[in-house]
Amino acid sequence: MLGSLLTALTAAVERSQAAGRTTSERLRQLETEQLTLHVLAATVVFLIVLPVLIAALVSTKRAGIVTSIADLAPGGHALSNYRRALIGLEFWRYMLNSFVMSIAVVVGKLIVSLLAALVIVYYRFPYKNAVFLFILFTLLLPVPVRFVPLYRLTTELGMGNTFFAITVPYLASATTVFILRQHFLSIPASLVETAKVDGVGPLRFLWSVLVPMSRAVLVGVSVIMFVYTWNQYLWPLVIINAESLQVAQVGLSLLRGQASTGEVAWSMVMTGSILTLLPPLALLVLFRRQLLETFTIQQK
Amino acid sequence: MSTREVFTDRLQAGVLLLPTMVVSLLFLYYPTVRAVGLSFYRASLARGDVFVGLENYRRLASSPEYLRSLLVSVLFAACVVVGVMAVALCVSFLIHEIDVGKGVYLVAVIWPYALPPAVAGLVFLFIAHPNIGIFTSYIETLGVDVNWFSNGPQAFVVVLIAAVWKQVGYNVIFMTAALGNVPESLTETAELDGVSRTQRLLRVYVPIISPTLVFLVIMNTIYGFFGTFAMIDLMTKGGPAGATNILIYDLYRTAFQFYEFGFASAKSVVLFVAVGLLMYGQFRLSDRYAYYGG
């Protein structure tokens, strides 16, 4: 649909373009062409934002039944809705658990992966390629293919329903090690040679040379890891059954259940949704430059 | 070989690698091996597994329900890949062709990368709800009876739209980056030759960025198979009548609704093989394209 619209419009623009002869006409045509593109881009942005915009508007209303566009006028209950969701329905607890889980995983993964990447790039030892392959191979083992046996293992370790269960299994990361390795390989080798001559040890080298030189990438991978962890749904759903330990994503599904039985209004579900969206969204907007830079490394 | 390898203390290397290796072994490799082992047993939550040989796999192969789920998964993933990539290619090209304000449009389009799938599912459940959805009355004036809580194909389409909506941004990130790397001289040559805009996209840009497109086909397939679990759990619970019962949801129900852990493990093994084949496919394809594209 979008594609054919784009084709039709550019074809129209190109026809008028072919008719143009003088430079000023050509310039004016380029301007109308750009204007068309801007109108199209704005439409696309509007369509992509619309569902969340509706959710945000509904989160300001009392009942949250909107069956027509006319019902979309913002209500005056924003403050009371967010207060009720966070305090009355204790959504703050789910948010806090999600924050603790995400920050623990980001920090832990970053440290563990920095050490592994340091060894893989700057150490000489036997079977190095095998070790690197061993780490990369875990890309084939995402949570969905192993959550059933992982559930058994975690409960057997007596760690079911604990904070340990939703953090430690996430600490090894092929993606993060890979991105850091690629980045380290782009840092001139002369730096580490100088460090070695000066008698600087590996950890010291990591901390005072590599880390300062990798700020953008470290911020980028941290955002990627945060978004990934924050958005986890399946694993917390099966391994956590105490509400006091549950994360925001699953907290939302509890709200959905209450909404369909009429215990809470749909405006509460939308309020919870907006709350759950805000932390990863804020990080993406704040650190978009570093994030985009890191993604270009990941694909290689 | 590389001059970067200046440290040689093997013990140190081992200690620094230890955390990654231990976590990988214990929580990634061991459960996978365990899944293979468990797939030969009849096992539930309680202890006392019974060895049944290939019984679970036999059950899988002869279960029409499972075969249907497999079919639904493949169809769903295919629709996700085609839908996401067609929309994302148009949007990326649009942003690429704009002179000023690219950065703003880019952020305004890629933000759903950060959108939690659970939120995507709930928001779509709400706006497309058969009774209280904001668009429902408008769509019904077009003569469509919106009843996707009981109509399978409709449910499939609604979940598909939500899934595409969430994934387009991720694709645009990689596509705009790839389009930005196309040499300016090529664009100029194409323009001088009077190649139309759409032709330029399809004949010049698409072949050049094909390694990125191959990478995205794999990422989107994996997303279609696994990443949409939360949406399905919140919107349709696999229904109605199995219309959105993709493999991962089917597996979840086998394990945590019916507590058939052995049978579920066999299903995990099938998924593992599927992911392996996909990754292998990407490896082979991107190898060829990298050579071809230079």
Image: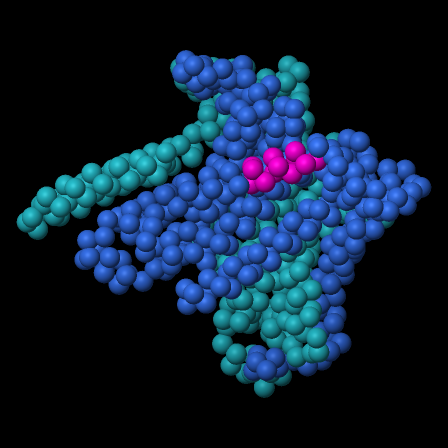
Chain colours: A cyan, B blue
Residue B102 forms part of the magenta stretch: no
- Residue B219: percent from the left, percent from the top? 54, 49
Chain part drawn in magenta? B66-77
Q: Would you say residue B273 is visible in this rendering?
A: yes
Q: Locate residue A180 relative to residue A75 in the image: left or right.
A: right
Q: Locate residue A106 relative to residue B179 in the image: left or right.
A: right
In the depicted view, which residue is nearer to us: A68 or A245? A68
Task: Residue at 52% x, 28% y: name it.
Answer: B158
Task: Residue at 48% x, 36% y: name it.
Answer: B165
Q: Residue furthest bottom?
A: A197
Q: Locate residue B183 relative to residue B42 in the image: left or right.
A: left
Majority secondary structure of magenta residues:
helix
Q: Residue furthest left?
A: A22
Q: Residue furthest right?
A: B48
- Residue B218: percent from the left, percent from the top? 54, 51
Please tell me in which quadrant of the rendered image residue B20 appears: bottom right
Residue B67 forms part of the magenta stretch: yes
- Residue B208: percent from the left, percent from the top? 38, 59
Task: Residue at 48% x, 46% y: name it.
Answer: B170
- Residue B247: percent from the left, percent from the top? 66, 38
In the depicted view, which residue is nearer to us: B273 or B159? B273
Q: Would you say residue A92 is visible in this rendering?
A: no
